[in-house]
Structure formats: structure tokens, C-alpha cells
Amino acid sequence: QRPKNFPPGPPVLPILGNLLNLSLENPLKDFERLKKSYGNVYSVFIGLRPAVVLNGVKAVKEAIVTNANDFSGRPQDMLANDIGERKGVILADYGSSWREHRRFALMTLKNFGLGKTSMEERIHGEIQYVVDTLEQSIGKALRPEVMFHNATSNIICQVLFGTRYEYNDEFIRTIVRCFTNISKIINGPWGTLYDSLPMIRSLPLPFNKAYKTIETCKNLVIPLINKHKKTRVPGEPRDIVDCYLDELAKRGNNGSSFSEDQLLIYVLDLYLAGTDTTSNTLLTGFLYLMTHPHIQERCQQEIDQVLEAKDRASFEDRHNMPYVQAVIHEVQRIANTVPLSVFHCTSKDTELMGYSIPRGTLIIPNLTSVLNEEGQWKFPHEFNPENFLNDKGEFVKPEAFMPFSTGPRMCLGEGLARMELFLIIVTLLRKFKFIWPEDAGKPDYTQVYGVTLTPKPYPMKVQLRAMK
Ligand code: HEM
């Protein structure tokens, strides 16, 4: 039953809690409906587990920014944590190991060139393979999901392992398949049942496959780490794995949170967080650009004007491209790539907007409710770059733009993701015209639910643009 002064919510059934109020396939509409009945801060029981859902910019910020110390934990007893052994960054609880690994990730991402040229070099290097793939597809319809997925995967692989893979490489294909399967299990009905009903966890049910699959991933990465150990020159890191090994040598074994076991999960974390998110955002972007040709053309005009004869775009050019910036941000708003953020958890008994919330309560920041919140956007329910432009046509970023979440747990890959989105979209729009194939019927903007939202697979046609 609800603790005293807990946020309101639908009546709770024994054992099942509110599972019957939520679609296990896609609960986003249910969360929206419950908001209408119970307000911006309400509670649901996912089986036996109490959860508080935060809706709208005010409630989300008040919890995870203003009261960040109380609201920045991660639940530690769900399938995802059990698989990840509570290590790494994404699912680590709010504490010193998380803090050290987060700081280290931000620092190493910076040293590998975020904001400097070398990250741009790596991204541009990978874009060339995308350009080649598109050039080979001129005149034919192609399905872009594998291409974008491989590109974002390679960018993060270069930062992590200093290497990229051919688009048909077995490593990439296996790791992508494994992560897709794990995320399907975690998000699907079996994962939800595992999280809601602890008594079924020891039974031989389909969620056990997730443990086997993560072993396959680890077995792919262990040889890479071993190779780094053999070939590295201490103090001269080539990539993040080398940086971590340097740090490990420096810290030794005296109580540090850094260890080789941590490294394995840390690397898998960054790979996982950095791939699907960015590629799904790109997929949404090109779906909308193809089906809104006037917006695509206006971007191309601005790109031609700003880049003139320059041989390629740099991230700095964004400051001269307000319209392109507005389009990319609008793509992120509509893509709503991580719709319920990553779940948080209260780390102590606390209060929010007059309600009492005990320690250990699951917190669901409903980013969807912020990205389409009425009153925060000029056009909350349509794809319209005007959401990010003021009367003078200048780029502005409303407070409710939080696809990367906010507060101390906010996405640490934001800088990398934004650089990738900008350079990929600008380079491709400069070179190609993207066309919705005539025989493809009406575009379907429905998204497939998961930790990340994905557009349904769609076809794409490309034509070379005459370079100005
Ligand atoms: C468009 C692309 C991306 C989106 C929309 C996105 C979104 C998010 C969101 C919503 C969170 C949860 C924040 C919270 O718990 O409040 C998150 C966390 C995280 N993201 Fe991203 N992300 C993207 C790209 C990336 C990339 C490229 C990386 C890789 C470097 C990355 C690494 C992480 C990590 C490590 C966390 C966990 C942070 C923590 O728990 O402290 N993300 N991201």
C-alpha cells in the first residue's frame, strides 16, 4: 500500500500493483493518461515496487536538479543491474565509484578531442564511409538503419578502442545483436516481471537469457582489453581503454573503485549508451527531413551559404547556422530518444512538492512529458523548427529541451552526441538530397518503444546535389 503522504495514483492490486494499468509493450500513453488523472507527480506500483513518475519541466527539475542529492541514485535490484553487476557508470548508484567513473569518462572524452580537432577528425573519418555507402546507393532505395548504427558504433569504438570495424564485421554484428536482445528482454514483459516480482527470479524463465548474452558481449571485449594491455605504452594512451589502464596502474589496489572488472562493464556501458541513442536520433532526423522537403532545402541553403568553398564543416560552424541548429534540436525533441530517461532512485527519505517519498523509491523522469509539454513549446505536438527560433530567426533553447535529461546524472555523452549529429547531418545534407521514395506510401512516424525509441524501418532515396 502507499506510504503516508505518498504521491497519489491508481488503486493498487495485491502482488500485481498497477501492472494492469500499464501496457508492458509501451507504457508511454498510460503514463500520459495517469498524468491527466493524478497530476504531474503521481505513483504507480510496478508489481511490489513503488515508483514515482515525474512529469513536466517543473517537477523533473525540482527533483533531479534542486534536490539532486536525494534523487540521483539508481535502483540496484533490477534485471539491468543484476546483469551489469552494479558496475560501470550508467547503473551505478550515487556514490564514490559512480562519481569517479563519471568524472573520468568526462575527462577522457575531453582529452580525446571533444571540443578539439581530433574528435572531429574521427567523426569526419567515419562520415566518409557513410558517404561512400550513400554514393553506391544513388538511384536505388536503401534502408538506412544499419548504416547509421554502424557509423555511431564505429565512432564510439574509435574513442574506446582506437579502432573501427567494417560494416559487415562479425564483432559489430554480434555485439549489436547481443545488445538488441538484452534490451528486448529488459524492456519486455519478462524483464518487467523480474523487476516486479522478486520471488520468480530463481526460476528458469526467459529472462535468464540476458545473463548468457552479456557473457557473449564480455567475451568479445576481453580480448580487446588484453591486446591493449600487451601493446600499450604507459603514459601514452591511444584511447579510453589505455587511459583506464594507466589510471589503474597509478592507483594500484589501495581501495580504489577502479578495477579490471569495472573496466569491462564501463566500456560496455559507454558503447551501449553511445550507439543506439545517436543512431536512432539520426534515423528520426532523416525521416522528417525527407518528408518535409522544404525544411531540408532551407537547411541546405544555410549550409551552402555558411560553408561556401570550405572543404568540410566544423562543429564551430553551428554558431552561424541558426536554422540548422533549430532543425537538429527539433529532431531531438520529436525523436524523444530516451523517453523515460534512465530510472533514478531516492537515496534517502525525502520530499517533493509537498509529498513524502521514502528512500529506495524508483523515480521515473518522464522526459516525454517535458519534450511535448504544453505551455513550454510554441508547437508542442508538431515537427516545427520554429520551436527553437525567436522572432529574429535566432536560435534559442527553451528550458524544457532535455533529451539528455538534467542534473548530476545528465547524459555524459551529450557533447559527443551533439558533435556527431551536427557533423553527420550537415555533411550529408550538403552532398545529398534525401527523397522519400514515391512508392513508399504515406510515412509512418509511429515509434517502436524500448529504452530508446526507434522509428519503424523506412526506405530512403538519395541524389547527389550540385555542389555550389
Ligand atoms: C542523442 C544521443 C543521446 C541521448 C538522447 C542520450 C540521453 C541520455 C539520457 C536521457 C540519460 C539518462 C540521464 C539521467 O539518468 O538522468 C543518459 C545517460 C548517459 N549517457 Fe547518454 N544520450 C545520448 C548519447 C550518448 C553518448 C554518445 C554517450 C557516450 C559517450 C552517452 C553516455 C551516457 C552515459 C554514460 C550515461 C549515464 C550517466 C550517469 O549515470 O551518470 N550518451 N543519456
Image (cartoon, rainbow, N blue to C red):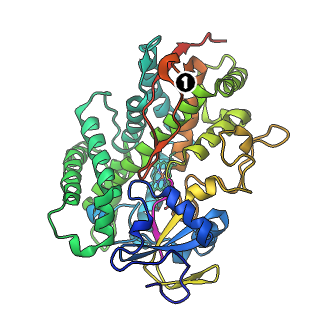
422 to the left or right of 121: right
Name the residue at 24% across, 47% down: 221
- Residue range (magenta): 339-346
Name the residue at 67% across, 12% down: 468
Q: In the figure, 324 relative to 60: above or below?
A: above
Q: In the figure, 207 relative to 328: above or below?
A: below
Residue 126: % across, % down: 44, 29
Pointer 1: what residue? 428
Quadrant of the drawing holding the N terminus: bottom left
Q: Nearer the viewer, residue 424 or 78?
A: 78
- The residue furthest bottom is 4
Residue 36: % across, % down: 62, 65
Q: Give the amino acid at mark 1.
A: Leu
Q: In the figure, 344 relative to 111: above or below?
A: below
Q: Main secondary structure of the magenta part?
A: loop
User: Can see residue 235?
Assistant: no
253 to the left or right of 338: left
**Callout 1 crowding tier (Cα within 10 Å): few <14, some 14–19, many ≥20:** some
Residue 442: % across, % down: 54, 27
